Amino acid sequence: MASVVPALLLLLSSVCLARQVEEKHPAIIRLGSSLKSVTESTSWASPSGRFAFGFYNQGSGISVGVWLVGKGTSSNRVVWTANRDDPPVTSNATLILNEKGQLLLTTESGEKKVIVNPTDSASSASMLDSGNFVLYNNDGHIIWESFNNPTDTILGGQNLSTDGQLISSLSENNYSTGRFRLIMQGDGNLVLYPSNDAYIPDNAYWSSRTNGIGKFHLYLNSTTGRLQLINSSNLSISRTLDVSFLPEGDSDDEKDNSSIVYSARLDVDGNFRLYTHLFERSGRLQTFPRFRALENLCKVKGFCGFNSFCTFNDFQPYCVCLPGTDFIDPYQSTLGCKRNYSEAHCKGGKANEGFYNIIPMENLVWNTDVFYSKEKMSKDECSRTCLEDCNCEAAQFESGVCKKQKLPLRYMLRDRDTLSTAFLKVGVRSLEAENESIPLEVIKPPMITIERKETMVQLLLLTFSLVACSCVLLSISGLFIYKFRVLRYKMLLENGNLGVNEELTLILFSYNELRRATNGFREELGKGSFGAVYKGTLYKGRKSIAVKRLEKLVEEGEREFQAEMRAIGRTHHRNLVRLLGYCAEDSKRLLVYEYMGNGSLANLLFKTTMRPDWNERIRIALDVARGILYLHEECENPIIHCDIKPQNILMDDSWTAKISDFGLAKFLMGDQTRTFTGARGTRGYMAPEWHKNTPISVKADIYSFGIVLLEIVCCRRNLDTSVSKTEEIILSTWVYRCFVEKELDKLVLGEEVDKKNLEKMVMVALWCIQDEPALRPSIKSVVMMLEGITDISIPPCPSASSM
């Protein structure tokens, strides 16, 4: 028997030791452990059972968090929430620490949500007696803890680090992000702010006043229950905050500390409070508020919303709408108020008196920096000027200063200790009255009743007279305007000042106008295959013109007329003769051109006794090449002239060469390079392909230009039977022979010319008159060769006859 007693004592001591070890070393949550919201296993408890992590009820759904456990779920107190702004999930959900070390929430629909984001994969987890939920790695080190990610509460033993913050919940039953923040600022100041505004000193409504002293973190001592600012550099206690708090409730100094848990929470009303939580022997949890930051809750900025002010009723704060406003939501008075009158009738000045009233309110103050006017004046003047000012919707009069601003107003409270008066301008017409429909009887026009026949006749006569007079006046006005415009046009026509239209559009002339302009077609300038060209004048002799009268068969003449109209009517270049207008009256077809005072290039080369200067001939050749370049490559649609020859190159008063006579021109579509057409042009200048029934391209004009270039160099025609030697009759053959034999000086009859330029001109011409179109250069290459920009290779023999 004596040996049994020591054995029992040993057994009891072992049980006590095991319990102590269990409290120090909480239960480990292994990989694969899970919680289901529809079973009894809905949470993981701490060793003492005071805290739990898992599912808790929120509204009609469930959320995941940590709470203080009381007897009965109604006394539980949530201290941390995961993903607090996510909506609660349905009741059928699973929480699992999976084999990959992830803590996941799986909803009823199969959606997976990550609860925490540790720096490494977790190998286990624990719910500690301090209220801290932690995750461990394989080495047993904590890789994530709820204490480092607070929501609205810190517990005993927990820090709020520098730049850390607590955010209030939306309501006592909704733990989403609310309207207030407590921030442990980097300057050492612990500050309360409204969430929906900038975090600047003007918007703060409480602070620890410790800015500029050092960097701190806030610590709640789990033993003494005191809030302390700890210096981050040396971990010394710099300030104990709760001595400056206001006592609220009984002291717990005489209570058993082993049954007490401390918490500090930023409450939904914006006040920061320190709480004592007492666990009774029955397991019931009692909560006592110990201290609070603000005694007057109306000084919490944002406690009431826009256009409402905070006041007290039986020591309880509540929100009241300003006159002229109603609650946005009658069931949530903190959301603020909206205007209930129309502001559309503000006239300004004394005219406002019939549309607005000024309502004074004593002891109403608000702190804001958006006053648009601050002036010294009397109280009566402040009220009157606000009524007359359309920008003023509220004025604050204090210490002889009138401060005005527009709605909305914010951060308002009624303070009995402040001697100030607020003037609120309220419209007399409500929005309901503004939106009411006007009865039909009001808008119905008065009915006119005619009872006598004589009155009816008089009314009809009066109406007819008014209509007749109006018609006469309109007719006279129309005739006057027409005469004025015709006279003005004639004056412009006589003066030759038609503005930009002269440059951009063709003028339609009558046949009689052109007959008078040419003095009855008396002075003939030249004659072509389709008609003669006559000299004329416009604008009382101030502008000379050339009139081409088409006289051949109607069908062919009409074809040439249409060709020239389409070609030259849309072109404008300094090396193209400009078409000024036309006449298409009955069967008469005439074209009006600018007058070229120095005749054609043919006259200049073949009919003068003295040759043009060599440099002048080079310039003329370049002028012609640039004109062809415009037709081939710079027009909207390429144009093949088909009849390039000296007779169709005219010289203006400044001896600039211009291409004319587009009667045989052929148009190409935008993506077209060749076309089939009947033979056209002048013998001696026509490319060989004209006689082969093959497609024609712009290279036909290159051949013609090559012949013209040889004529410009030699100042003689391509075919000349008056020469002394038969080998010189065909110019192209003779030029190639001279080029091969290096006797190019024979071409210029001893004229002093630059031999390099002469050789260049001849080589370009020989390339242009190659029988094969593919061998001929483009007109752009021709211009570049003539300008000396590109080198010229030795040309082959242009035709078999040249040999």
Image (tube, rainbow, N blue to C red):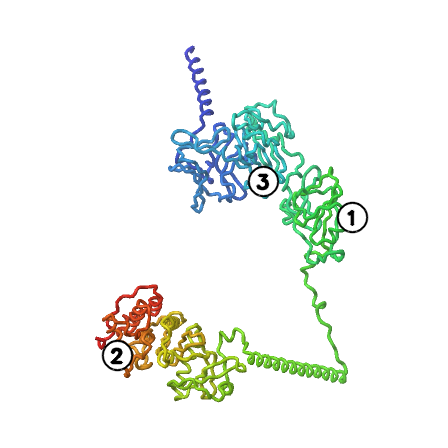
Which residue is depicted at the point 43% across and 33% down?
143
Q: Residue 580 in the image: state x and y as whole percent.
A: 47, 78
Q: Answer left or right for 430 relative to 41.
A: right
Pointer 1 residue:
380
Q: Quadrant of residue 362?
A: top right
Pointer 2 residue:
728
Pointer 3 residue:
199
Identified by mark 1, the residue type is Asp
Q: Residue 15 in the image: state x and y as whole percent.
A: 44, 20
Looking at the image, is 148 positioned above or below residue 751?
above
Identified by mark 3, the residue type is Tyr
Q: Toward the viewer: 227 or 52?
A: 227
Identified by mark 2, the residue type is Glu
Q: Count residues near mark 2 (Cα–Cα under 10 Å), then give few for <14, some for 14-19, many for 20+.
A: some
How far apart, in angstroms, are the residues tagged by discs 3 and 1?
Answer: 37 Å
How far apart, in angstroms, are the residues tagged by discs 2 and 1?
Answer: 116 Å
Which residue is depicted at the point 41% across and 80% down?
599
Q: Which quadrant holds the C terminus?
A: bottom left
Q: Quadrant of residue 718?
A: bottom left
Identify the residue at the far top of this view: 2
Mark 2 vs 1: CB contact within 8 A? no
How far apart, in angstroms, are the residues tagged by discs 2 and 3?
Answer: 101 Å
Q: Earlier in the sequence, mark 2 or mark 3?
A: 3
Instruction: Give the structural element (helix, strand or loop) at label 1.
Output: helix
